[in-house]
Amino acid sequence: MNLEEKQQRLAQFAQAHRENGLPVTMQRRAVFESVLEREDHPSADEVYAAVRAELPEISRMTVYRILGNLVALGLLNKICHPGSVARFDPKIYQHHHLVCLDCGGIIDLEEERLNKVAWPDVRRFGFEIADYHIHFRGRCAACRQAAKKSRKPPTKRKQTS
Ligand SMILES: [Zn+2]
Ligand SMILES: [Zn+2]
């Protein structure tokens, strides 16, 4: 995220708080900035650990509550993939994810053509689609490398004479 983009997001942050009559506290700002600077889609606990380095007094509950608020205000995205804890994403525009089945790592995938998937007709379910994102599941480079290393070489058969 470049400086200009960051300033724009901080302005958006201030505006959303003003419009909703919420105070911009140091804690809220620290939580928001902590997620804004990351591309690894941290969990709430990871955000808590990062913010606590800066504001040692902050409680886990407060960080969880602020994250919930920031999502409700549309300033952050919450992503939930089955089988893993909720993660937070500073990118609020449509993009997609590569999700590692081994380490749970999430990599952003921005491909214009994936934003153009035709939505199915789901009126028969009485359902109204709001948005979508695609997650491709597999194994990341680091996990593939680790798997390769731990694979035991084939045991040599002893020559018996
Ligand atoms: Zn991995
Ligand atoms: Zn993302």
Image (cartoon, rainbow, N blue to C red):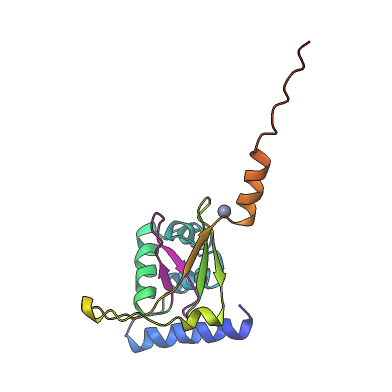
- The quarter of the picture where the N terminus appears is bottom right
Q: Which residues are magenta?
A: 76-93
- Residue 134 location, x and y as percent? 46, 71
Q: Is residue 122 above or below residue 27?
A: below
Quarter the C terminus occupies:
top right
Q: Per the image, is 59 magenta? A: no
Where residue 63 sits: x, y (%)? 40, 63
x, y (%) of residue 135?
47, 66
- Percent x, y of residue 155: 69, 27
> Residue 4 occupies which quadrant of the picture?
bottom right
The residue positioned 66% from the left and 49% from the top of the image is: 145
Q: Is residue 149 above or below residue 133?
A: above
Image side of residue 111 versus residue 63, left or right: right
Residue 38 lies, with reference to residue 10, above or below; the image says: above
Taking the spot 55% from the left edge, 70% from the top edge, the residue there is 108
Q: Nearer the viewer, residue 60 or 131?
A: 131
